[in-house]
Amino acid sequence: MDEPVVHISGFRMDFADTTVVRDLSFDVRAGETFGFLGSNGSGKTTTIRALLGLYEPTAGVLHINGRPFKPEHGSRLGYLPEERGLYKKEKVMDVMTYFGRLKGMDRHSARQWSLAYLNRVDLAGKAATQVDKLSSGEQQKVQLGVTIMNRPELLILDEPTKGFDPVNRRLLMDIIGEQKSDGATVVMVTHQMEEVERLCDRIILLKDGTSEAYGTIDEVQNKYGGRIVRIRHAGPIPPSPHYEVTLEETNYAELSITDGTDEAAILRELMDAGLVIRSFTTTKISMEDIFIRVYGDHTQPPSSVPARAAAARGA
Amino acid sequence: MAQHNLGTVISFEFVRTVTKLRFWIGTLSVPVIMAVVFGMIFLSNTSTSTAAEAQKNAQFSISYLDASGLITPADAAAFGAVPAASSAAGIRDVQSGAVDAYFEFPAHPETTAVKAYGADRGLFENGKYAAVAQAMLARAVAVKIGSPQLSRLASGSAQVDTVTYQGSEVSGGMNSVVPPLAFLVVFYGLVVLLAGQMLNSTLEEKENRVTEMILTTLKPTTLITGKVLALFMVGLVQVAVFASPILVGALFYRDAMRIPEFDASQLEFDPLRMTVGLLILVGGFALFTTTLVAIGAVMPTAKEAGNFMGVMIALIFIPFYSVSLVVSEPHSPIVQVFTYFPFSAPVTALLRNAFGSLGIVEAAVVIAILYIGAALMLRVAVRLFQYGSISYTSKVSIRTALRAGSRHAVAGPAEHPAEK
């Protein structure tokens, strides 16, 4: 089996007397898009910073391409940190050329590449504009351009869509997709579960500094029940060892199948209990549902669960 | 790659500084102000000498009394002066407006002041009374001596060339002091003008949140070294700009600005003192730059960092307050302390080197202190930047940041919970 691009084993991180990450281990394989998920303060950014040598780990092994990361190793890394920033008083083109040169491009190539990129993201006319004169969304685009200069082999994106409107979010996702098609390995720290389901091959969920779930999307979905039954009905839902009622409203309910029972058996059980079933659909548990189940509804406004239910009903 | 990146950092930092309008406004404002001052000196000197001449030749009615016997009626007549009946009468004539001035020459004008009484013509024009009284006396003395040559000698205008020896070798005197003293001027210029930039050079990465992108792209040592070298180059540009009006003035307007006559060809460039001066200049600049960069790395904002700039600037001026001691008693305890304390060493040692009181062993020790100190501060600055600048909003404890080089992270509790 190929050596993983990212290998983290037994990672522990203490800040003074607080342990932020404990005994964390996972690999990221070449060419995959890896989702790094977790609630605020769960240790994601700390892990990324330690992986990139910005923090000294308290314990553990953190390797990129088989050794601790050092910029002078010449790895083609594209890193979009959570804390965004550019040289605000410089012109867009000067900043991009500077980073391009630091990443090993010659001045001409860096400028040519930057012009093409700015054209792609509708900023061609802003090449000579001072960075702080751009809107925050435009600055994000420039920063993404700096990140993907010189065809990175490993892209680490810490909340890449933060600050983007839906249109630019789509553009960003397209660009990340292109990088992946070009062979880049992508590690994405995000809260956007839709992005995770659309882009990621495998994920890790971090909770309180430890791994809560790790594997492919299917594997993680299966771990959390895998399938959801949505029903429109009349009458009370009977308790069952085969499912758990995760949402119940007057005429609508969501049941999470907790064992290997198939959907037809569940339907039969409900009808045998005298329930009037008006509609019966099954779906896989969404990553958003898993996220909320793992981290709790306190991460969302109280109204969001009914809102999701309404969305699921097509209301 | 590291070489390439060092060049890239130097080029980026230098170009972006010298292509800014505000850099040139700040830089050019100094020579412009100097030009204005020189212009005012020029105009003032011109008008002063004109006024002095006018005052000496001023024609106004004078009465006088001479107890010294030096002033003959012919001397007095040359100035239109007539004898007064008495001291009281002379003063009364001035008060009544009968004459413009009354001069009272004492019996011993070489020890006692001549008294001049005159009608008030304003602060500046009143100077004519003293000027004319002196001119009358000078003319009288010159006539008494009887020889213009002797008169010039008596007025102390004889030229003296001094030759001094160090052993059997002729020593350079002031001509050998001036060239190495230039390093002190350059040092002051560089540090005073660039201290703010030194302090802010790493703060910018921190305040703009560029640190993480930078630290994953190049070694912090390369970044800091590049910034220090770029600052040195910027400093040289500023020194050149600032020096230009002085050079122009010295070359083309020397007389008008009353720059003392000195023949540049007589300047002595002692290779040893020039080498020592250059090494101390570079070492001192490197020490101050790395120290200010290190301070910038642990401060969250320019405002907080600015408090430290005053301290650093004070350190280079303190030895200057005891400059006479440095020159006259270079081996006194206080001068020795200033010589070897790293942050006062550059100024003290450059002064002593210029005046020839810094021995070769002392120079070697000072240079070693500065270069070792600069190297250590560079390491500290790099470490503080590496582990401190990522702590965006809080001031990092220096001790914690330095310990971070081993196995601890520095982001305090205030930093990591903000993580998303």
Image (cartoon, rainbow, N blue to C red):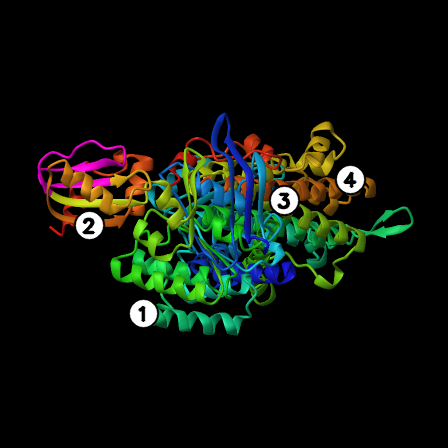
State the SS at label 4: helix
User: Residue A212 appears at what percent x and percent y?
Assistant: 41, 37
User: Residue A178 appears at what percent x and percent y?
Assistant: 41, 66
| Circle on res. B378 | 3
Front disc: 1 or 4: 1
What's the residue type where badge 4 is placed? Val
Within-10-Å neighbours for mark 4: few <14, some 14–19, many 20+: some
Badge 2 vs badge 3, beta-carbon distance below 8 Å = no
Badge 1 vs badge 3, beta-carbon distance below 8 Å = no
Q: Chain of mark 1?
A: A
Circle 1 is placed at which residue position? A122
Q: Does residue A304 appear in the picture of this structure?
A: no
Front disc: 1 or 3: 1
Which residue is situated farthest in the right direction here? B168
* Corner quadrant of residue B398: top right
- Which stretch did the figure color magenta? A233-255
**Residue A250 among magenta residues:** yes
Q: Is residue A188 left or right of residue A25?
A: left
Front disc: 2 or 4: 2
Front disc: 2 or 1: 2
- Does mark 4 fall on the same chain as mark 3? yes
What's the residue type where badge 1 is placed? Asp
State the SS at label 3: helix
What's the residue type where badge 3 is placed? Leu
Q: CA distance from mark 2 to mark 1?
A: 43 Å
- Does mark 1 fall on the same chain as mark 2? yes
| Circle on res. A187 | none
**Residue A239 among magenta residues:** yes
Identify the mark nearer the N-term, 3 or 4. 4
